[in-house]
Image: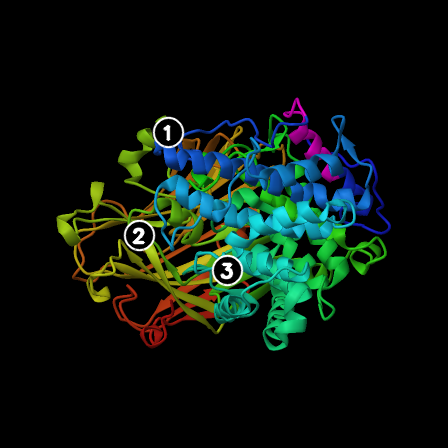
Amino acid sequence: MKFQPKTTDYQLSPYTGLTRESWLEAGRYLLEGIFQNIDDFSKPVVMPRKETEITYPHLNESPENQAVQRTAEVFEGLTRSFFIAAPLIASLPDLEICGYSMAEYYKDHVLRVCTKGDVLYVGTYEDQQKIVGKADPFRTFQQTVETCALVICLWVSREQIWDTYTKAEKDSIAHFLDGYAHASTVPQNWRLFNMLDMAFLNMEGYPIRKDVMRDHAQAILNYYAGDGWYRDGHCFDYYSCWAFNVYAPIWNLWYGYENEPYIAGQFEENSNKLMETYGDFFDRDGWTNMWGRSNIYRNAATSAFDGNLMMPGGKADPGRARRISSGSLMQFLGREDFLYQGVPTLGFYGQFSPLVQGYSCAESPLWLGKAFLCLHLPADHPFWTEKENNGPWDTMTEKEIRETCLDGPALCFSNHQANGETILRTGKVVKAPRDTHGMWNYSKLCYNTKYPWEAAPAGSGAEENRAVISWAEAQQYVLRDGTAYPEGTVNPGGAGKANVTFWHGQREGILYRRQFFDYHGEAEAHWIQAINLADFPVSCGILRVDKLRLHRAPVSLTLGSYGFPDNGTEVAEKSCGSARAVILKGRDAAGREKQMAMTIYDGWKELSVLHSHGTNPDSDKSVIICASMGREQQYGGFEPYVLISQVITKESHEDFGEEELFPIAEVVYTDPEGCGSYGPVMLRMKDGSVRRVSYEGMEGCLML
């Protein structure tokens, strides 16, 4: 059953109605779902497991690794549910859920997982080394992640839990934390886990290695890429927001301001820089985009607002921060399919295996509890007392587009008032050629807040259409050729996807990127099939003017629209001169009206509809509109180089206008053959504007 708040105030919160009391109710709703699965006070937060092939504990692991994973699951369930429970306990010390005192349950179980000999003991770092049978100084364990959650929650509920332990009990917990605080970590956002462990110990009077602390902190600072975003490993994703921009502010409060003022000042400045544009990352309803890894954490992305506002110099707009946080909360808790036996599913909405990574377990989605850390802000904080506002959405005209382009993290997001959606276009992406999961997460051409990414087509519908459209995926180009690759491998089935995306940036309102198909690091880039991407927003979507950069022939190419939830879909076709469009109308799994259209212009020959199932996060069945160049094209003469298309969407069944479906009045090429082989391409739009697309000069500024 979906969450329905009992307490609302549409004077204070005109967009969502949610107040601080509403958030407390939402926390209780989640805790009740969790604790209905715990039939004895002594049992840990280990939840029903629907998926067993991808998530841990992995059935095919060695007994030693399975033992480590079982304890990790116990610890993960405890600490991530504590993200929800701790701020509720601080606000409601006598809170009971399913007959259990929350303060007593977490006080007892925290001590037990840290106490050697207890059946729930999850082991120190040194214990884990012994279990796997060797002392590997570079081996890391999931428990390190969870120790950070633990110390944050002990801080949030200090008066109700931490301060009630005896000195001996505190020493036992501190001893448990010490190994994870100082031992090996992963050289990306994990450093923050060690930093907070050490900061908590230091704050409580326990000795730490301050040289190790400084080394981690300077490394984190050097991951900063600009515009408030940090590079996590190679990638940019929400870890920059729910890790770097939450943990660094907490570290500032616990340790940085006093001991490392320069680094703390930089962390605060970076957080404020993020706040300048982060609100525009969400859509008019406050919805979070499905993008990057770990999207089972969902609205945890809003915790960056809390991270900023907990600092004395935080500059986030409190009313807008709450509006987005509450909107994103209801994006998920307002769905009937959000829970599995009371616990958030391993998916974005309902259960969705293509989204799930092997480092997750049944309790991992409880990381979304990080969004509830806003409850540690007191009731009189501006986050709770200021009136909700929707930022620029409140003043944008009917068809206005607000676009933000950030070169540091290679992110371009556009807010579309006509449909209320936010579309994200990304760059600086490098994935292994066969890492389809990574490509879905990072290298789709566009990510839309109302159309979460679709996995590769599957099922009878895909089989029936394969002969017609070759092969296609949503918001990805797929190239078929016979290119040979290193180690004698051949493009399997001839289906190559773009696994590397270089960023060029924006010129004259056009965003330029380059994608390489099946790029291998050991192969020189100029031997690889590629496409220059050039696109810009229109009122209801994105218009593409992309140019092929091919090496060998014959080839064929397809391009998919977004995945469209198929709960009874109407399909229509329209044409205007040589341009064609396919229009879909239907509803998502929650019953909301949906409409999507794909239009093709020059370079494309066919437009087809592909049915699939099990590949869409919103609905079991889905539809993709697919553009195709037709059968294998020989390159070497005056073939079309430029591919022009658009995808537009609407959250209603009101028909698209003719100018929305077919916005181009004329395409003017520089070359005399009119195929776009060289020179700028001019698009004269029906609204009177002119768009000049020029791919020349990209070579000198391609960024990863």
Query: Looking at the picture, how far across and down is residue 230, in whole percent?
Result: 51, 65
Q: Residue furthest left?
A: 488
**Region of the chain picked out in magenta, as a range:** 26-40
> Residue flagged by tag 1: what amino acid is it?
Gly
Amino acid type at image mark 2: Ala
The answer to whether residue 212 of the structure is visible from this angle is: yes
Judged by depth in the image, the label closer to the viewer, 2 or 3, is 3
Neighbourhood count class around disc 3 (C-alpha, 10 Å): few under 14, some 14–19, many 20 upward? many
Q: Residues within 10 Å of mark 2 (few under 14, many from 20)?
A: some
| Of callouts 3 and 1, the N-terminal one | 3
Q: Tag 3's secondary structure?
A: helix
Quadrant where the C terminus lies?
bottom left
Q: Quadrant of residue 529?
A: bottom left
Q: Nearer the viewer, mark 1 or mark 2?
A: 2
Instruction: Using the numbered discs, state the Cα–Cα distance from disc 1 to disc 2 in whole angstroms.
Output: 28 Å
Specify whether residue 656 is in view: no
Residue 35 percent coordinates (x, y): 67, 29
Mark 3 vs mark 1: in front: 3
Scheme of colours in the image: rainbow
From the viewer's perspective, is residue 431 above or below residue 338? below
* Quarter of the rendering occupied by the N terminus: top right
Q: Amino acid at mark 3?
A: Arg
Circle number at residue 342: none
Mark 1, residue position: 461
* Label 1 CA crowd tier, 10 Å (few <14, some 14–19, many 20+): some
Relative height, residue 523 to residue 375 (above, below): below
The residue at which mark 3 appears reads as: 191
Residue 323, horizontal then vertical, whole percent = 73, 53
The residue that label 2 is drawn on is 432
Q: Position of residue 662 (x, y in %)?
A: 48, 53
Question: Please, what secondary structure does the residue beneath circle 1 have?
Answer: helix
